[in-house]
Amino acid sequence: MAINETHDPNLRSWVDSANDPNTDFPIQNLPLGVFIRPDQDELPNIGVAIGDQILNLSEVEEQLWSDNFFDEVADACSYESLEMMLILDPGEVSELRRRVSRLLRADNKSDERYIAEGCLIPMDEVEMLIPHFIGDYTDFYASVYHATNIGKMFRPDQPLMPNYKWIPIGYHGRASSIVPSGSEIRRPSGQTMADGAVAPSFGPSKVLDYELEVGFFVGNGNEQGQPISIAEAENHIFGLCLVNDWSARDIQRWEYQPLGPFLSKSFATSISPWIVTTEALEPFRVPAFQREDGDPQPLAYLDSPQNRERGGFDIKLEVLILTEQMRQQNIAPHRLSASNTKDLYWTFAQMLTHHSSNGCNLRSGDLLASGTVSSATKDSQGSLIELTERGALPINLPTGEVRRFLEDGDEVILRGYCEREGFRRIGFGECRGRILPAS
Ligand code: MN
């Protein structure tokens, strides 16, 4: 991928709201998503976010794109999910981006523009869906700050396990319970072992947490037994979204040894619905994490000059909370922390390469997530267990309420955006979820 005409910071769109300096969706972004209009009897459609509007790609395709060269791409646009889009060549996805960009530019006075105007739908009239069937979901543990913060709580003298700086640690998440932003999250029940108790008990989790993460979708997968090399890895990353890996810490604490998290996490995972393509993120690539002196260098299969120079992403992340009381008193969401994906110890290319290195076949549409993104400082910790030090340091909210962990009615809002001198700011939109009482 390279910087091209679609990244030009001077581009403006004839969709006015896309020119607002604060929008997440200027013409330089053009993320893909799948929506339905609840008030209409229709199948889901693929759209591109532009300002506060959605360009309905299936309608654009039907009315504008009939040339042969574009057949396969146009066909992918007419599906009810991103399933066929994911398996296009990266060059074809790039050509689609160029066409959409040209179509939406302010200086486009052609007939095409007037047809495209008829293919716009206001974002507030749609419901966003999971973009495609997700067969598998893997969650990594790529923030060394998060791993250290958590490790300290359980092993003060040896926070990081000896393998941490050698392999991207991960666990297999549950794909069936991934839900789009806005879906309500039912507080899970489970088995927990209270301090000093002689036997565990079963009931609603009392220690419910969020995890601020970024995930990526696999574009083209690999054959079983045919690992993806680090040199090829970027070609298999389709695009990124925000991920909230909801976590019941009391369930997790009792169940996690020896095989890792299970029911403490599998009840729900929320994702933001707009997939920001790696091409849109090209201006925000950064070198892989600068390891401290004395840290090992990655083994050869996880190392390449390209990964070292531009394997990272500079994505600013934040997490906010909106309690029931705040909602009633019309108080704006309260920011809990802010961090950045550039501080991840492992790059997405390394995670993908490592995942397939044993011959495991990754499939198109699989979701691989970063793990909690915490940066170095206290106010950059991406979960409540870190921020409150397992509940010891409660957080004060503007209503006078305090939070150690999530209460029923609390809504957690993740945001992500990229900014860099000389380029247009682009964003991910939001990933929201509100906690309902246990059933
Ligand atoms: Mn996680």
Image (cartoon, helix red, strand yellow):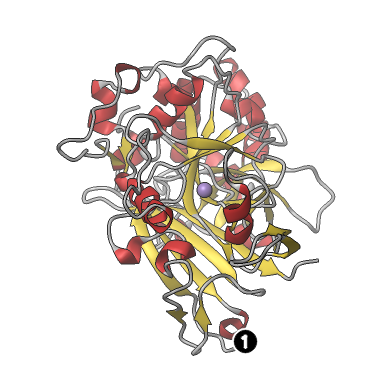
Residue at image location 46% in from the left, 16% down from the top: 228
Residue at image location 40% in from the left, 25% down from the top: 234
Q: Residue furthest top?
A: 225
Which image quarter is the C terminus in?
bottom right
Picture coordinates of residue 12, whole percent (x, y): 37, 51
Q: Residue furthest left?
A: 293
Picture coordinates of residue 105, whole percent (x, y): 42, 45
Which image quarter is the N terminus in?
top left
> Disc 1 on helix, strand or loop?
helix
Give the camera-side residue of 271 and 122. Answer: 271
Picture coordinates of residue 160, whole percent (x, y): 35, 44
Residue 84: name its quadrant. Answer: top right
Inspect the image, locate mark 1, and give the three-letter code of the amino acid beneath it.
Answer: Gln
Q: Residues within 10 Å of mark 1 (few under 14, many from 20)?
A: few
Residue 404 falls left or right of residue 131: left
Q: Residue furthest front?
A: 198
Q: Determine whether 191 is above or below 353 in the image.
A: below
Residue 262 falls left or right of residue 368: right
Picture coordinates of residue 20, whole percent (x, y): 40, 62
Give the camera-side residue of 209 and 433. Answer: 209
Residue at image location 48% in from the left, 14% down from the top: 227
Q: Which residue is mark 1?
A: 328
Residue at image location 22% in from the left, 35% down from the top: 295
Q: Determine whether 158 is above or below 62 in the image.
A: below
Residue 21 makes an appearance in the image: no
Mark count: 1
Residue 345 falls left or right of residue 253: left
Residue 283: name its quadrant. Answer: top left
Residue 224 makes an appearance in the image: yes
